[in-house]
Image (cartoon, coloured by chain):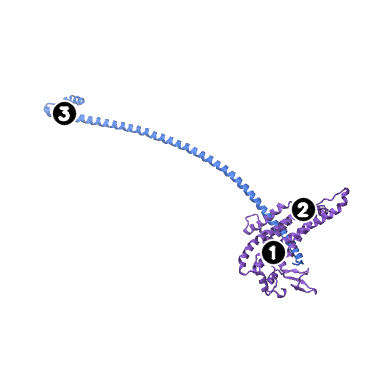
Amino acid sequence: MAAEGGHGPQTSGDYISHHLQNLQVCRDDTGQWVWNTCAGNPMAINVDSMFWSVLLGLVFCFMFWRVAKRSSAGKPTKFQAAVEIIVEFVDSSVKDTFHGTSRLIAPLGLTIFVWVFLMNLMDLVPVDWIPLASAAIGIPYMKVVPSTDVNITFGMSIAVFFLIIFYTIKNKGVTGFIGELTLHPIAPPTKGAGLIAAPFIIAFNFILESVALLAKPVSLSLRLFGNMFAGELIFILIALLGLWQLPLHFGWAVFHVLIVTLQAFIFMMLTIVYLSLASESH
Amino acid sequence: MDINMTLIGQTIAMIVFVWFCMKFIWPPILNALEERQQQIEEGLAAADKSQEKLVEAQAQADEIVNEARQQATGILDQAHARANEIVADGKDAGVKERERQLAAAKAEIEQEANKAREELRGQVSAIAIASAEKILKREIDDKAHDDILGKLAQEI
């Protein structure tokens, strides 16, 4: 596939794997920057994912910043009203779930929601448009939906993961954090003969709670990735069907609009829920 | 599908975007929203208040109109009474005038009649004298019989 260099795949298998190939750049063993021969290299960068992700992030920032700059209490313009609906939606979601005061969580939720939504929305661009256009200007691979790249979803969920740890330590202290990992769900005995069993109980708790803690970012990112990857794959498969793709594509796109919005909402909501759990004492 | 540096890149991008949102997007929009909420609240309160005032003013206006209506009725009644009075006065004056004129006319007629009678009397006496003169012709002294003829004329 890489050898073809974007000159048009021949078989269906080639077509599909070509669509699922990221445009990668990395340094090879000799220290040279090379394109698209980076399989398995942990220092590689998926240029297309990063490009579209940052571009869509900038789109989000620019749109909302323009509204924010001119926002006033007076009569809003239609676009301002639309933006305010989103902001208010996120704000009420945060207020329903998160009872502490934090200047970070609501903007974080807004950024995640709109950004993930925009990234997922790229799925609705017909699968061949941008790759063919890129091929025409000499770029062999172009994967346009950043959220079908597991690096992107993990990148976001890891930021959320560190925020969870930060909020836990901030609100409960280091001892609180360690206690949360070791003293639940089975409280170890503090006196009597049971003391002998305490280390085992603590170890058991620690294993259980660490898995629970690590499961949060993993499930958060894999849920988004899985949904979007599957959706994208089905779009690609539909694109192989010739004329029949038109009604099928429309039907799947309509259904996918729901997934796009829902996944963005779930990612935001779970982030808020995790952070509120981290900052509330039991 | 490999995990690579894209992950770190995305994390950094996310931190930057979240920071930007927290700094430049969220506060102004939320401030505007809260300010507008407050304005709407105040506006609604003001609307309620003005509604109350409107009802009050309506009642006041009704009262004033009623008062005016009563006054108007009073004025109308007075005017009617005055008009009746004037008509009655006019009638009285007319009757009196008529009677006065009637009396004057009667007096004049009386006078005219008297005058005519007097004249007639003179003429009758002249005729009587003339006829007597013609009858008697010869021996009647105007002066000697004047008082007899005067008495005669008086009697007619």
Examine the image and state in which quarter residue A181 appears. Answer: bottom right
Q: Nearer the viewer, residue A137 or B49?
A: A137
Q: Amino acid at mark 2?
A: Ser
Q: Colour of chain B?
A: blue
On the image, numbered disc 3 is attached to which residue?
B129
Q: Nearer the viewer, residue A155 or B37?
A: A155
On the image, numbered disc 1 is attached to which residue?
A230
x and y, in percent, of residue A218 in the image: 76, 60
Question: What is the CA distance from the residue labelled 2 to the residue labelled 3?
Answer: 161 Å
Q: Amino acid at mark 1?
A: Ala
x and y, in percent, of residue B40 in the image: 63, 50
Q: Nearer the viewer, mark 2 or mark 3?
A: 2
On the image, numbered disc 2 is attached to which residue?
A279
Q: Is residue B114 above or below residue B48?
A: above
Q: Nearer the viewer, mark 2 or mark 1?
A: 1
Asked if both marks, 2 and 1, belong to the same chain, the answer given is yes
Question: What is the CA distance from the residue labelled 2 to the residue labelled 1?
Answer: 34 Å
Task: Assign a secondary structure to mark 2.
Answer: helix
- Chain label for disc 2: A
Question: What is the CA distance from the residue labelled 3 to the residue labelled 1?
Answer: 165 Å
Q: Nearer the viewer, residue B82 or A249?
A: A249
Q: Colour of chain A?
A: purple
Q: Is residue A58 visible?
A: no
Q: Amino acid at mark 3?
A: Ile
Q: Residues within 10 Å of mark 1 (few under 14, many from 20)?
A: few
